[in-house]
Amino acid sequence: VNTIKWWQKSVVYQVYPRSFQDTNADGIGDIAGITQRLDYIKTLGANVIWLNPIYASPNKDNGYDISDYDSINPEFGTMTEFKTLLDKAHQLGIKIIMDLVVNHTSDQHDWFIESRQSKNSDKRDFYIWRDPVDGHEPNNWGSYFSGSAWKFDEATGQYYLHLFVDEQPDLNWESQRVRDTIFDMMNRWVDRGIDGFRMDVISLISKPDGLPDGHIADGAEYSNSDKIVPNGPHVHDYIQEMRQKVLNRADLITVGETTGVNVENALKYANLDGSELNMVFEMEHVSLDHNPNPALQRWYDQKVDLRKLKANMSKWQNKLYGVAWNSLFWGNHDQPRAVSRFGDDRPEYRERSAKMLATLLHMQQGTPYIYQGEELGMTNAHFDQLDDYDDVETKNAYHYLVERDHLIDGETMMRYIQAQSRDNSRTPMQWDNTNNAGFTTGKPWLKLNANYPKINVTESLKNPDSIFYYYQKLIQLRYNEPLVTTGKYQLIDEDDAAVYAYLRQGKDDALLVINNFTDQTLTRHYTQYTDQKHVDLLLANYADDTGETLRPYEARIYKLS
Ligand code: ISL
Ligand code: CA
């Protein structure tokens, strides 16, 4: 039996620095702003913060294109300010995990500048260079952000691989020199006192042997790299090497963002035997509502069928039980807002459904991640002009799908963007009802959600019944009730398309978690689980317990003993 690790009992709060708190009126959130708001995160109760990238970057993909791993992007502040943030967080008992983006660098990184100079460059093999094939790209892989994953470089007449934008060339992990250079860099961050790493697309670092073509969906021009690149032949060797050379040096929290990973792969990446990472951050449940036409990928606006969601989450809960560990999340900086996507953001249901979603997720096995503003029930941006969006994925997708390939008309695409764009979650944090929600006194880099006068921190902290305080209670429940970490998950009524109920079973006790996923009043009986038991209502999102009657978006957590 594995002993419980601190990171299994933790709750992570994700800060997207660009949109959290600006302190110098340039419209961009900064490190000093995070330091200023640490008390807020402490009040919520999270004990770990994950920071999206704050390194030097030309920002072709908001910091995921890094030009120097050892320096802080001046728009966010200085290394001294970062150290202050780290110290203050530690004083409050909060750990900080850094985004580690090492599948690719920026094309402005010194390594790439040198690599592209000539075929004989000392850094040539730091990246993945190939000759043209019949005057074309070396294979048919598509970029995650539209178009080909290859870019022709005039200087040497070869193509380089970039699974994301052109300016994000993929590193060649097959080179021992590349690996050691990255491990050294990670060790410098460990020496700076950070508490862990969230590893961006770590499942992509080992490319399949021979870089074979993938299947091209009807209507698409390139194959979907997510179907062919993840979990390459050496990925586990590389991560085990990283464990030996870096991760074992300290008691770090390590999270692998693992696109294209299934349960079987996850048993390796996140095995509780400690050989690789602490946990995966997998994407299956946030892909169920993507377009059924593979050529359109995520772009769609229909809600997921609850039965599909239950089946998917239950699979992960069951198969990882006792052997591996997962992250629990509804949203992040790549996903739409949880309440708009999985709940109901109409004013009469927003708060209730946000609490229901939180209940459903936080009582599962795994480490929960709260994306900034989720605890306020922040909603999708609802912008109606393409120009109001900033995100490169969104803009590229519109360009390719609408303007170039005519796969879809502009109006439909705008609806899909309103539902799925990454900018839905990137609008600035809503602190109060003053100009720009207290985020900045300058011009914000991205428009705010127009609802900030109503939905903001100040309002939430005033209202004892707010979503914020509900999250606070859920977090405390995780810290105080061992069943939340250790209980054996059991789904109840897999075919119920309206209610998501499950148990977390201990030896002589259990949690019973009931979530009405609809705006309807329903009747359900769970007496077979509560009979002969002492039943305590631990937390609920309505003031009274109406037994077998479940009101719209009602959520309850019972302890059975
Ligand atoms: O957002 C997605 C769906 O369109 C994902 O495929 C996402 O691109 C993927 O999970 C990788 O995300 C991570 O790496 C990207 C970066 O743009 C994202 O912000 C980051 O979370 C490239 O570094
Ligand atoms: Ca700023």
Image: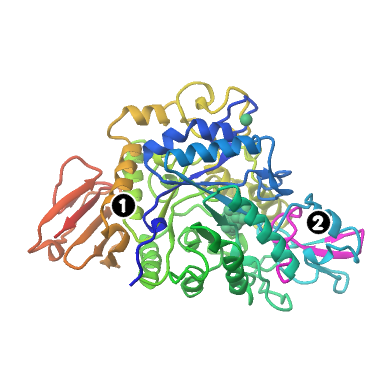
Q: Would residue 154 be counted in the magenta stretch? A: yes
In the rendered image, the vertical position of residue 17 relative to residue 335, given as above or below: above
Q: Which stretch appears magenta?
A: 152-174
Q: State the residue in front, 30 or 315.
A: 30
Q: Position of residue 457 (x, y in %)?
A: 41, 31
Q: Is residue 267 above or below residue 199?
A: below
Q: Amino acid at mark 1?
A: Arg
Q: Which mark is residue 478?
A: 1
Quarter of image, res 83 = top right
Q: Main secondary structure of the magenta part?
A: loop
Residue 464 percent location from the top left of the image: 28, 32
Residue 503 in the image: above or below residue 375? below
Q: CA distance from mark 2 to mark 1?
A: 45 Å
Q: Position of residue 14 (x, y in %)?
A: 49, 46
Q: Is residue 499 visible?
A: no
User: Residue 381's mark?
Assistant: none
The amino acid sitting under disc 2 is: Phe
The quadrant in which the N terminus is found is bottom left
Residue 153 point in image, percent of width and height: 87, 59
> Label 2, on which residue?
112
Contact between labelled residues 1 and 2, with CB atoms less than 8 Å apart = no
Judged left or right of residue 177, residue 358 is left
Q: State ligand 1's quadrant.
A: bottom right
In which image quadrant can residue 198 be found? Answer: bottom right
Coloring scheme used: rainbow
Residue name at image x 68 percent, y 71 percent = 207
Q: Secondary structure at mark 1?
A: helix
